[in-house]
Amino acid sequence: MPPVDRHPSRRAFLARSVALAGASWLAGRSDGSSDERPALDFPLVDLHTHLDNSTIERVLPLGIERKVKFGIVEHAGTKENRYPVVLSDDDELLAYLKRLEGKGVYRGLQAEWTDWAGCFSPEVLARVDYVLTDAMTFPGKGGRRIKLWEKFDEDEVGLRDHERFMDRFVDWHVQIMATEPFDILANASWLPEALMPGYETLWTESRIGKVVDAAIGYEIAIEISASYKLPRLAFLKQAKAAGAKFSFGSNGRYPNMGKLDYSVELARALGLTSADMFVPGPHERKAVVRRGR
């Protein structure tokens, strides 16, 4: 019998978010079929995949079939975070790295909250290929961490005033980019379910600009999420014009990793080339190394 999920997860919320988004991203596409656009000049890499319900041996054939190289990420932080696996010390991280060694995949972390880096020594942390995180865990009253994809008291984070919340949410994006040593902003431009219908209105040019400027300033790539179908085209156009770097991510568990249709479609619409894409390494360019953590 499969384990019972006793609390909402990003995956459960994902199903609702994608349903809300529907086909709205298509509205930003240029006329004409996708095969009229030039082929991408870089190999496909899915840097946001998880092994929660599988093994690396089972996953690797999917990469061959879909012609996608995988970056595997494991959640990292204190045990207060609730996931199937949370790496919380050097021994756990080293065991994870050894398990994936020589498998032909990138080995990454999905950082949780703002206390994750302190769980590891700088020397061991520097062995990972890259780190990604998102802004979906948000400070509530008294600094309590609120997972915005789960059920929560809207008054706890001031969600009822959408404009004011958005300003705080944008500031939160900037804060974690300024203070946390990571390489990829995952699930970029995601909004809580109650705000998604107003996505285009709430993500103003000014708000996009603040997030993009911080990403560029701290050398953080913006993930084009194939699962959430985010960011939408206007956000990505502004990011590209400013000189941002990008990555692809499915947030996939077996057998859904490597399904990058949205990422590829938006990359074609934007005319992305290899120069626009984040690639893990070299060692001295890793955020955990160059930012001294």
Image: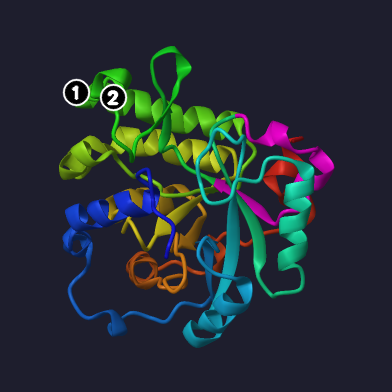
Q: Is residue 32 left or right of residue 247?
A: left
Q: How many other residues sit within 10 Å of disc 1, few (<14), some (14-19) or many (≥20)?
A: few
Q: Quadrant of the N terminus?
A: bottom left
Earlier along the polypeptide chain: callout 1 or callout 2?
A: 1
Residue bounds of the magenta highlight: 115-132
Residue at 62% across, 72% down: 56
Q: x, y percentage for residue 206?
A: 32, 33
Q: Is residue 117 one of those drawn in magenta?
A: yes
Name of the residue lying farthest toward the front: 1
Residue at 51% across, 81% down: 62
Q: Is residue 11 left or right of residue 285?
A: left
Q: Nearer the viewer, residue 64 or 119?
A: 119
Q: x, y percentage for residue 25?
A: 22, 60
Q: Nearer the viewer, residue 74 or 127?
A: 74
Query: Secondary structure under badge 2?
Result: helix
Against 152, residue 255 (above or below) is below
Q: Which mark is residue 160?
A: 1
Q: Is residue 1 one of those drawn in magenta?
A: no
Amino acid type of the residue tagged 1 in the rendering = Arg
Residue at 68% across, 40% down: 88
Residue at 42% across, 71% down: 256
Query: Secondary structure under badge 1?
Result: loop
* Quarter location, residue 264: bottom left
Q: Which residue is mark 2?
A: 165
Which-is-in-front pick, marks 1 and 2?
Answer: 1
